[in-house]
Image (spheres, rainbow, N blue to C red):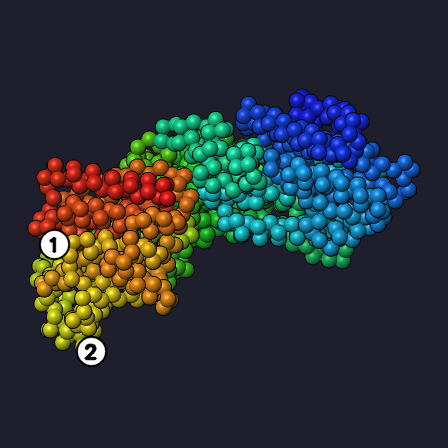
Amino acid sequence: MSSSVIRIPSPRSVIDRRDLVERIEATVAEHGGVKGRKVIVELLRTALENGRAEIARRLIGKPSAGHEVAEAQAFLIDQLIRVIHDHVVANVYPASNRSKGERLTIMAVGGYGRGEMAPHSDVDIAFLTPIKQTPWCEQVIEAMLYFMWDLSLKVGHSSRSLDDMVRMSKSDLTIRTAMLEGRYVWGDQDLFEEARTRFFRDVVSGTERQFVVEKLTEREERHKRMGDSRYVVEPNIKEGKGGLRDLHTLYWIGKYIHKVRSPAELVDVGLLTHKEYRSFRRAENFFWAVRCHLHTITRRAEDRLTFDMQREVAARMNYSDRPGKSAVERFMQMFFLQAKVVGNLTGVFLAQLDDQFAKRQPRGLLAGFRAKERIVKGYKVFGGRVRAPSDDWFARDPVRMLEIFVLADRERLEIHPETLRLISRDAALIRDEVRMDRRANELFMELLTSRNNPEVALRSFNEAGVFGRFVTEFGRVNAQMQFDMYHHYTVDEHTIRAIGLVARIEKGELKDDHPLAHEVIHKLRSRRALYVATLLHDIAKGRKGDHSILGAEIALKLCPRFGLDEEETELVSWLVRHHLLLSATAMKRDLSDGKTIADFVEVVQSVDRLRQLTVLTIVDIRAVGPGTWNSWKRQLIATLYGAAEERLRLGHAEFGRPKRVEAKKAAVAALGGEYPGLIDRIGAAMGDAYWIAEPEDVIARNLVQLVASANEPLSISTEYYPARGATLVTVIASDHPGLFYRIAGGIHLAGGNIIDARIHTTRSGRAVDNFLVQDPLGRPFMEASQLERLGTSIESALANRIRILPQLVAKPDARPRADAFEVRPRVLFDNKASNRFTVVEVNARDKPALLNRLAHALFESKLMVHSAHIATYGERAADTFYVTDLLGEKLTAPQRLKAVERRLLEAATESIAAEAAA
């Protein structure tokens, strides 16, 4: 608790209390206390609105002045509460000679108690009385609350006697923390001082260690709820990891143990250095500014920095675009750098606290049994921590700033916070001579390729500020956000997570999740090349130009410095240059088309490169964020890997088309049962393309369905297909133009997303169309009711019983936040990717009606769709179609291609326009 008064610049321009009091007194003189109430409320409301307007003006004038604005807001509320109290006591419930029990103090608690408020924060107040409330105290409290409610303030209040306050603070951590922040606002000051004395004497004394443990447990649980990373791309400023609440926790602990009255006093009690305190204030000031902007924009207590808000707050805080980096990305980089500062401060602060507690341990019989300090390679090791032996240890040899991290990883030790302080202080000594030092680079490579836990070691290395100094190119992507809905983490965090995944796959920990990577990782010719390629794959993000090409050039410069030989350097550069090739081929191309595999293999050229690229692709996708890796992607990558590896091993003595068809028929027949007979009966009705394209288990299902539906105009099968982590939908019907777009519409209306589609026609003119479907969150439909809904919806769409487009447009978007992003539609034609088809790729904003509209546009352009492959990257969809004209020929005429492009672009923009209109 503290009785500090808030001081702000030119307070009267925020609220002139004397003038407000005079107006209220004049109103009371004219109308009386009760009759004039309506006018008094209006006077108070006007003062509140004018005050808020002035604070908003200050925020626009000084968009980064977080403390100033937050304190002005608390000051405004203080003055209003004082005026309301004085008016109620003097004019509404005057009491001439009050008893000792008729005393009342008003205390600000919680954030308001700290003297900091965002424009729409709750007003948390405690009314304290010496003993059980008297009727007069109750009347005054109630009257004050009604005035505050009339002003539309969100009031969190409690009314307690001193005994109640002590008793409830003891039993409830939340109440205890709120009272810890207690600040005198108005009323009986002696009573407040008495409450303060009793709180620290009766509640705090003797419970310091318990409070710290409970607060840190509460913090851990909060972090887990909020995503447990400082680098989530839609952070919560108040509750998220590295946000305001983490700073407040440090202050609460310092206040509870040392009774500090302000964060500045954390320096006096030895928990922070002067430099760390300045960092504390800078981070807090930045977060308060962002929070105040958020509240002002949304006109409510909003603490989530969502994508749509990020752009607006960046503009209000005067961030501008730079080559390769947008204003919003620069703003969010500053946000994450501040969150990182908070993380560093927390680590140092808590370890310092630990030391203070350790020094307080009673000396007694067991004191002699305490573990002895040992020396390892010149460093002091004690209690699982390693520390530098002297203050000038790193200044004398800056390479030691790498050595200590390697030692900590090797011996599984933590670095002592005092030593981390020294490292932060001396990190600037890492200059070119250190970067080029052979021993320093050997140490760095040992850390990067550690067989223990490189993820933890590198994260600590990064947060200490050494990583970005030693590899300056990595420093450029530090805390850099990628402004889209696909990437969940900043570039540095994504990279460190990817390296951690490589290590876990290598140790065999992810065998079930990544069987292919587990199988090939130990066959690599150079594990160092894989780790370095993982480190460098996104190193050029945020620069002007293609980050893959620029990154490959950076790799050629850095690899020799790291000690890689010529062959490894060339391999790393190639991997960085092509790190998106495997995923783009697997997800956007038809893997049954021999040309797809041939083109891919032509770039890859060796089995070792294929293995390296496969592991890199897998960890890159998985490290994007939770939910981005699934069994569908696993299956696609495994299929492409298998086909490419076979081609690389056998060279170009690939099966001819008839042999591939025969091999597939034999594989289906080998499934036994009725399948050999079905192949003999109806196998000839299916064209070669069908046998090559479909896996044997799908062919087996199709053959059974074809026979069963021989005399039916329409047959729809829906079943969970675990091999692909999706639902297999097969539609057999008389082939006719527009069949594909109608089926797609029916699937979307049932809540499904098509991720893959293969369209076939038998020699007798029946369509056999296979679709793989998931829900908007990438999960298969499994329940009987879901599967039935899918079938019914497709049937209704094909029978024209429903108007597909209006219903699709009216359907709510599963990801409404995508509206914050602009995705310019693009259409790409590729006549070289397939020998038989023109490949059309459409990139556009992902919307429920998109695929249906694109399919309809292709139908109107008189094109046949033979297969479709749908990939989504957050808010962006990449839909690829293998098409021919009605005669089965590729599209080559420039005018025809131009007309199709125009129609597809219209369809992509229409789906967004229609959505907006709906």
- The percent position of residue 662, horizontal first and vertical second, equals 11, 66
Q: Quadrant of residue 653?
A: bottom left
Residue shown at the point (14%, 47%) measured from the top left: 862
Label 2–label 1 contact, CB within 8 A: no
Could you classify mark 1 by the number of other residues whose Cα lies within 10 Å: few (under 14), some (14-19), or many (20 or more)? few
- Secondary structure found at label 2: loop
Could you classify mark 2 by the number of other residues whose Cα lies within 10 Å: few (under 14), some (14-19), or many (20 or more)? few
Identify the disc placed on residue 652.
1
Q: Quadrant of residue 735?
A: bottom left
Q: Amino acid at mark 1?
A: His
Front position in the image: 754 or 177 = 754
Q: Is residue 164 left or right of residue 571?
A: right
Front position in the image: 629 or 806 = 806
- The percent position of residue 638, horizontal first and vertical second, equals 27, 58
Give the quarter of the figure containing the C terminus.
top left
- The percent position of residue 582, horizontal first and vertical second, equals 26, 49
Identify the disc placed on residue 673.
2
Q: Quadrant of residue 69?
A: top right
Residue shown at the point (72%, 41%) measured from the top left: 145
- Secondary structure found at label 1: loop
Figure check: 27 above or below 798: above
Q: Amino acid at mark 2?
A: Gly
